[in-house]
Each structure stands twice: as structure tokens, then as C-alpha cells.
Image: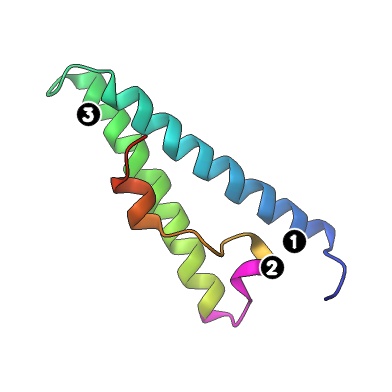
């Protein structure tokens, strides 16, 4: 396997950060009052991070890049969104 370059390491780091932010938004939303503006905001944040991960994964496949190269292997965006925080 080729040594990762700076761009590859950057994307891998961003993937980890987005995944962490998705989990944090879900955790925060869970602690909010259902139906409140704060809950809706945090649910929306979680959905946005889900969309980003899903799009990144789809584009990676479309460009013929191995998911492992960018740290997207083992990530199921739908599972990330719907699993317990």
C-alpha cells in the first residue's frame, strides 16, 4: 500500500471530525425537550453531518477511490444517524 499523502490524511481527519460531530449532535439532541427549537436544531445538525458523510462515501465510490484510503470504510451513514448516541 502506498504511503498516504497530505491530502489523504487531511480527508481522513475530516471524516473522523464529521463523525464525531454527528455523534455529539445526536447526544445533545437526546438531552433536549422533544419538540423544542433546540432539539430541532440539534436534530438538523445531525442530519447535516449524515448528509455530508453519505455524500463523501458516494463520491468516493464514484471516483473509484477505495473507502479505506479516506477512512470511510466501516461507516454506514444511516446507522450513524439512527443508532443511539
Name the residue at 74% across, 61% down. Answer: 8
Range of magenta residues:
62-68
How far apart, in angstroms, are the residues tagged by discs 1 and 3?
34 Å
Q: Are marks 3 and 2 in contact (CB under 8 Å)?
A: no
Disc 3 marks which residue?
40
Viewer-side residue, 82 vs 18: 82
Q: Compared with residue 56, is residue 27 higher up or lower down, i.e. above or below?
A: above
x and y, in percent, of residue 33 in the image: 18, 16
Residue 8 - label: 1
How far apart, in angstroms, are the residues tagged by discs 3 and 2?
34 Å
In the rendered view, does 50 fall on the left or right side of 72?
Answer: left
Q: Residues within 10 Å of mark 1 (few under 14, many from 20)?
A: some
* Sequence-earlier tag: 3 or 2: 3
Q: Secondary structure at mark 3?
A: helix
Q: Secondary structure at mark 2?
A: helix
Residue 69 - label: 2
Viewer-side residue, 81 vs 61: 81
Q: Compared with residue 70, is residue 19 higher up or lower down, i.e. above or below?
A: above
x and y, in percent, of residue 78 in the image: 33, 56
Q: Compared with residue 72, is residue 83 higher up or lower down, i.e. above or below?
A: above
In the rendered view, does 71 fall on the left or right side of 48?
Answer: right
Placement of the N terminus among the 4 image quadrants = bottom right
- Mark 2 or 1: the one toward you: 2
Name the residue at 32% across, 45% down. Answer: 83
Q: Secondary structure at mark 1?
A: helix
How far apart, in angstroms, are the residues tagged by discs 2 and 1?
7 Å
Q: Determine the image quadrant of residue 44.
A: top left
- Mark 3 or 2: the one toward you: 2
Q: Determine the image quadrant of residue 72.
A: bottom right
Amino acid at each position: 500500500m502506498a504511503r498516504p499523502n497530505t491530502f489523504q490524511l487531511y480527508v481522513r481527519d475530516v471524516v473522523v471530525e464529521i463523525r464525531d460531530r454527528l455523534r455529539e449532535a445526536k447526544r445533545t439532541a437526546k438531552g433536549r425537550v422533544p419538540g423544542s427549537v433546540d432539539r430541532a436544531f440539534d436534530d438538523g445538525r445531525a442530519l447535516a453531518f449524515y448528509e455530508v458523510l453519505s455524500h463523501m462515501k458516494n463520491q468516493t465510490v464514484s471516483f473509484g477511490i477505495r473507502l479505506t484510503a479516506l477512512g470511510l470504510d466501516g461507516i454506514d451513514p444511516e446507522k450513524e444517524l439512527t443508532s443511539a448516541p
